[in-house]
Image (cartoon, rainbow, N blue to C red):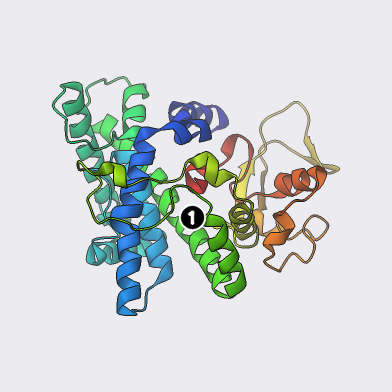
Amino acid sequence: MNHRSHSQAKRIVSNVYTKSYLQTSEDWQKVARMIVFERLLPAVEGIAKKGAVINVLELAKSAAMDLSSGYIFGSANGMTFLQDVEYRQKWLHAFESFLVEPPQIRAGGMIEQSCMTMCNAAEASLQAREKEESGNGCTRAVVYEQLSQRLEVSDKDPTSKSRTNIIASELLDHLIAGHESSGITLTYAMYELSLRPQLQKELRAELSTLSPALSLSSSTPLFSDNESRHHLPSPSAIDRLPLLDAILQETLRLWPAVPGPQPRIVPPTSAPVNISGYDIPAGVRISSNAYTLHRNSEIFPDPNTWNPDRWINPDKERRQEMTRWSWAFSSGGRMCLGSHLATQ
């Protein structure tokens, strides 16, 4: 997709992924409360009580999938990976093949069909909402509705095959990126913390300063008369936790979920583009990667060591320079659309 087409497509849904939108979105907050209190914390508590062994990567991807799909398609229409273990394992196994299969092989398979099913459910919810028939207290299909209502195609029929396929294709990209990269990052964070018991204690102490506390205080379903029992700390309060932020930033630095090349095509210009003294002609494919950028020892001393302390109270110039070299979500017009969703 060329730059102009990509920019136009990105603008259609970019506003519902901004930090300001997410931090004030009742739908996002409700989805997050539901996943945390009804699914994630009970799952972890159950594992702990049984003394069972858990695949942390699978658990992290499941939490990320339930969160992202609940926001994209609505809480009633998203995935239930944390609860349906058999289905999630089947889906994740199919996804491994999906990543390497050619389009003609994977077309219509389990991964694409699951996305189409959620799209159809979200469309039904949207139609019901417009007719004022939806009163179950579930959240809106925020991203689906935004894309559905603003997508400009010649056929305005919401049931048209072409329109449905365009929406499903776009949201499948969101779904894949939303669960995989966040799951990988969470897994590496847990791995690094598992090696440092003292840091775990310090993080728990910092998290205990939040109000309300993050604990499983009630088994009452979220969508009930007792909804007030379930609260999450405000996003702004979480943003102000320096150790948590440092752990996240350092994990994204040393273990970026997308460490490999991110190619770009030099645009047509009257003269070659000059990068660090090298003239690059138009049409040439170039790339950079987070793995290399994040291991610049001039910016990140001892770069192969996971050290959250480098992010705690650096001077302003040092912080700006480290941030400038941080490329876990890329940068510029092709920067990851869901970077704020991933870090909320």
Residue 155 in picture, x, y percent from top left: 27, 21
Residue 229 in picture, x, y percent from top left: 30, 47
Residue labelled with disc 1: 181
Residue placed at 39% from the left, 57% from the top?
Answer: 215
Q: Is residue 98 visible?
A: no
Direction from residue 257 to residue 173 in the image, left or right:
left
Q: Residues within 10 Å of mark 1 (few under 14, many from 20)?
A: many
Direction from residue 27 to residue 264 in the image, left or right:
right
**Quick one: 179 or 163, which is closer to the camera?**
179
Q: Where 320 falls versus 49 (above or below)?
A: above
Residue placed at 47% from the left, 54% from the top?
Answer: 182
Tell me the kind of residue under disc 1: Ser
Q: Is residue 232 visible?
A: yes
- Outermost residue toward the right in this view: 277
Q: Where 293 falls versus 89 (above or below)?
A: above
Residue placed at 82% from the left, 43% from the top?
Answer: 317
Residue 264 in picture, x, y percent from top left: 62, 43
